[in-house]
Image: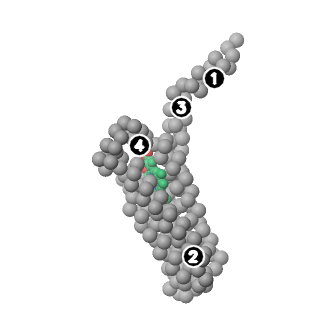
Amino acid sequence: MVSYQQWFIPLLKSTKWITFTKKSMYAILKSLHSFWAILVFITLIYAILNAIKGRFSNQEFVQKDLRLSLFGLIFSHTQLLIGLFLYFVSPWFDQWSAIGMGVMKNTESRLYLVEHPIVNILAIIFITIGWSLHKRQSSSARKFNRISLFYGLGLLLLLSRIPWDSWI
Ligand code: HEM
């Protein structure tokens, strides 16, 4: 009888298995990242418009405003996490070992491997700063200002480095 060591251990060691797992992980993460981007944009735009409206109509910063801003923060942080995992399983990542710094000379690989991740991490840092600063303010107007300004800057940065051609 064939013992499980005779097929299971070679299967685990086989590079075909690793390639298969990596490919399916890539397909799942790419679809998730692509779909989640829509949620990120909806929640951020909603939070920004709500903050601008609240500021200009001199409203109190209430529970609803806090929740809307929190949604923007949570959805963008989740996207950051998905993006980090996607980065290492994406075929783009293999370009680092294939052409090294040649990545920087090609517009497409530079966008996927350098500009998109760095600028988006920066955007999420802005959004996080906006969230932290709004909590330290005592007046509603200042809270709305912090959210609209920092979330707005974050959104502009995100929009500047989306690979539009492959997404839409
Ligand atoms: C809120 C932040 C982010 C947004 C809104 C966003 C959005 C997107 C969108 C719309 C695409 C195109 C997907 C498609 O072609 O179907 C994409 C691709 C990609 N993103 Fe992001 N992303 C974000 C953050 C990140 C971060 C932080 C990383 C890595 C550290 C990352 C890594 C990637 C990679 C590697 C691809 C290319 C996948 C491929 O085609 O192989 N993303 N992103």
Q: Nearer the viewer, residue 167 or 146?
A: 146
**Contact (Cβ within 8 Å) of mark 4 with mark 3:** no
Q: Earlier in the sequence, mark 4 or mark 3?
A: 3
**Label 4 beta carbon less than 8 Å to ligand 1:** yes
Q: Which mark is residue 18?
A: 3
Instruction: State the CA–CA distance, disc 2 to disc 1.
Output: 55 Å
In this view, the mark in front (2 or 3): 2
Residue 95's image quarter?
top left
Residue pictured at 43% horizontal, 56% vertical: 118
Image position of 29 with respect to 64: above or below: above
* Residue 24 in picture, x, y percent from top left: 53, 38
Q: Amino acid at mark 4?
A: Trp
Q: Which residue is mark 2?
A: 134
Reading the chain from its start, which is encountered first: label 3 or label 1? 1
- As drawn, the label of residue 92 is 4
Q: Secondary structure at mark 4?
A: helix
Horizontal placement of 138 versus 87: left or right? right
- Which of pointers 1 and 4 lies earlier in the amino acid sequence? 1
